[in-house]
Amino acid sequence: MQINYNLKPASERRTQQFKPETNVGFGNLRTDHMFLMDYRDGEWRDPRVVPYGPFEMAPGAMALHYGQSIFEGAKAFMHDDGEIYTFRLNKNAERLNLSGEVVCIPPVPEAMQLAGINALIDVDRLWFPMQDGACLYIRPFVFATEDRLSVSPSQQYTFCVMLSPSGAYYADGFDKAIRLLITERFHRAVSGGTGASKAAGNYAASLRAGKAAAEYGAAQVLYLDANNKQIEEVGAMNHFHVLKDGTIIIPKFTDTILKSITSQSIMELGEALGCEVRQETVMLDQFIADIESGEIVEAGGFGTAAVVSPVGSYIFEDHRVLTVGDGQVGEHTRRIYQVLTDIQKGKRQGPEGWMQKV
Ligand code: PLP
Ligand code: COI
């Protein structure tokens, strides 16, 4: 793929890496450039790296009206050799196209996605944040640009990648366990819907529930299935819990749960983590009973942005609070976090092909 470069003059670009003490937050910063490619007449064309800035888009662009838009989230890390490595980016490229299928967006060839992302990181490598635990968050997305108001798939799209030098997703980082709201009032997904995709609309639909969670002092909602019987996932991460023998349980992937690449990685690591990791249908009643009896000792979430986020308690709509173990970050959660982040940072050898040098 021949990529065109229209770069900012060097004098207007970042010229130094961040200092280790800079707290960049999550998703707030942008780098100097973005990668773009357009879909016209049945093919992706004009791959280019250009200065980060506003798009020119018709007010009738279908993404704005009917939400035909999908995205991905991946990360790149700097290793001790000073080089930048992406984590399992091929899995994100593959999933972007699975999400595309759900909302009728044509596939973006994986090789094109990877070439575009690597080209962009290469140009903006001085934006890598040096603070402990920080990384370059990679946000590829596709949106419908055709100027037409009938409800049918757009014939035109833009694929864009932007980068955000980022730290922890939750403001308190890993060390403070979060609280989740368990509610029967809001649902994220139903069978036959778009829940297993990273369709933009899923996140719009989660905002109201997120507001309710905040009113309860919770960080997010732990969504149940439409019948309020099973535990599904959290708005921006899969859910997991740990049994007292150390077994990690992740709710079974269905068409209402996003197939988290972090969860898949934890399952693939199983042995290296020194415990069994398995997927099950998790019934809410049993889950509550197992926390109360001490059979479940830890819980948390897995996600690219969230990494491994410990959950210390749940709150229900009647304000009842259910505390997991002692409500603090547990030893199993700590170990999972350590193993995963050590692999990402190149401090521990991960499975073949997980880290790819830019
Ligand atoms: N579930 C939802 C709804 C998400 O938005 C995310 C974030 O990407 C995840 C789970 C975690 O998936 P991954 O580990 O691939 O980032
Ligand atoms: C990610 O973890 O990459 C996500 O996409 C979650 C996001 C909604 C912040």
Image (tube, rainbow, N blue to C red):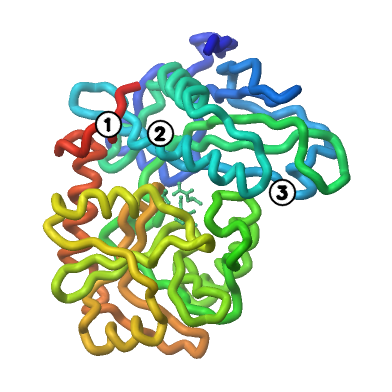
Image position of 277 with respect to 139: above or below: below
Direction from residue 167 to residue 185 in the image, left or right: right
- Classify mark 3: residues with Cα within 10 Å, few (<14), some (14-19) or many (20+): some
Choose the circle earlier in sequence order: 2 or 1. 2
Q: Distance between the residues labelled 3 and 1?
A: 34 Å
Q: What residue did someone put label 2 on?
A: 90
The residue drawn where x is 20% and y is 38% is 350
Q: Distance between the residues labelled 2 and 1?
A: 10 Å
Element under label 2? helix
Q: What residue did someone put label 3 on?
A: 67
Residue 223 x/y as whole percent: 50, 71
Element under label 1? loop
The residue drawn where x is 39% and y is 52% is 303
What amino acid is labelled 3 in the image? Gly
Residue 247 x/y as whole percent: 20, 68
Q: Distance between the residues labelled 3 and 2?
A: 25 Å
- Residue lying furthest right: 149
Residue 357 x/y as whole percent: 30, 23
Position of the C terminus by quadrant: top left
Choose the circle earlier in sequence order: 3 or 1. 3
Image position of 26 with respect to 139: above or below: below
What amino acid is labelled 2 in the image? Asn
| Mark count | 3
Choose the circle earlier in sequence order: 3 or 2. 3
Cβ of mark 1 under 8 A from ligand 1 = no
- Classify mark 1: residues with Cα within 10 Å, few (<14), some (14-19) or many (20+): few
Q: What residue did someone put label 1 on?
A: 353
Q: Mark 2 near mark 1, Cβ–Cβ under 8 Å?
A: yes
What amino acid is labelled 1 in the image? Gly
Q: Mark 3 near mark 1, Cβ–Cβ under 8 Å?
A: no
